[in-house]
Amino acid sequence: MRLAVGVVCLLMGGATKVGAQTRIDVPGRMGGHVSDHVHQYRALAQQGYELRVPPGECRSACTTVLGLQKDRVCISPGATLMFHKARLPDQTAVMWGSYPLQLRNVLLARGGLPDFGRGWLRLDASDLWALGFRRC
């Protein structure tokens, strides 16, 4: 179902051609089921799409896009990624496991993931560019 959302975005003109890749905005930016997001983002990347985190908030499960190879994701100026634990411990483990080690170290250095419903740990575009994520 979630993959269909990404396909609908493409059909509605939400994609732009960038070199040999097609860039689409990250679907599901308000969060949702972690495993669904991980599978959807991986499927889109395997199909050759570059996922763009646009300006605005990318919350919770949306942040798992950062687990893709860095050549498959770019961060726009004005993007803010907002992290917290998932509702279920097994989904928190999936989320945490999707992040690259360098990102996990930064999250730990800033106090770790807040419990669900207890606030957010925020990283801005510049924080992510400093970790080697590309600027869109």
Image: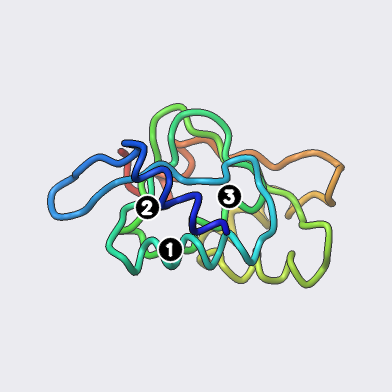
At a point 38% along the width and 35% down the height, the residue shown is 76
**Which residue is pictured at 49% across the width and 55% down the height?**
4
- Is 21 left or right of 26, judged from the image as shown? left
CA gap between label 1 and label 2 equals 7 Å
Q: Amino acid at mark 1?
A: Leu
Residue at the image point whose x is 34% and y is 44% from the top = 11
Q: Which residue is mark 2?
A: 73
**Type of the residue with mark 2:** Val
Front residue of 39/127: it is: 39
Marks 1 and 2: CB-CB under 8 Å? yes
Measured as percent of width and height from the top left, residue 18 is found at 18, 45
Q: Three-letter amino acid code at disc 3?
A: Cys
- State which tag comes first along the sequence, 2 or 3: 3
Give the residue at mark 1.
68
Q: Quadrant of the C terminus?
A: top left
Near mark 3 (Cα within 10 A), the count class, few <14, some 14-19 or many ≥20, is many
What is the distance, in whole Å, between disc 2 and disc 3 at their CAs? 12 Å
Q: Nearer the viewer, residue 99 or 50?
A: 50
Q: Earlier in the sequence, mark 1 or mark 2?
A: 1
Residue 97's x, y, as percent? 61, 71
Along the viewing direction, whichever of 98 and 88 lies nearer the viewer: 88
Q: Count of labels shown?
A: 3
Q: Which mark is residue 62?
A: 3
- Residue 110 drawn at (x, y percent): 68, 48
Q: Is residue 12 above or below residue 85?
A: above
Label 1 – label 3 distance at C-alpha: 12 Å
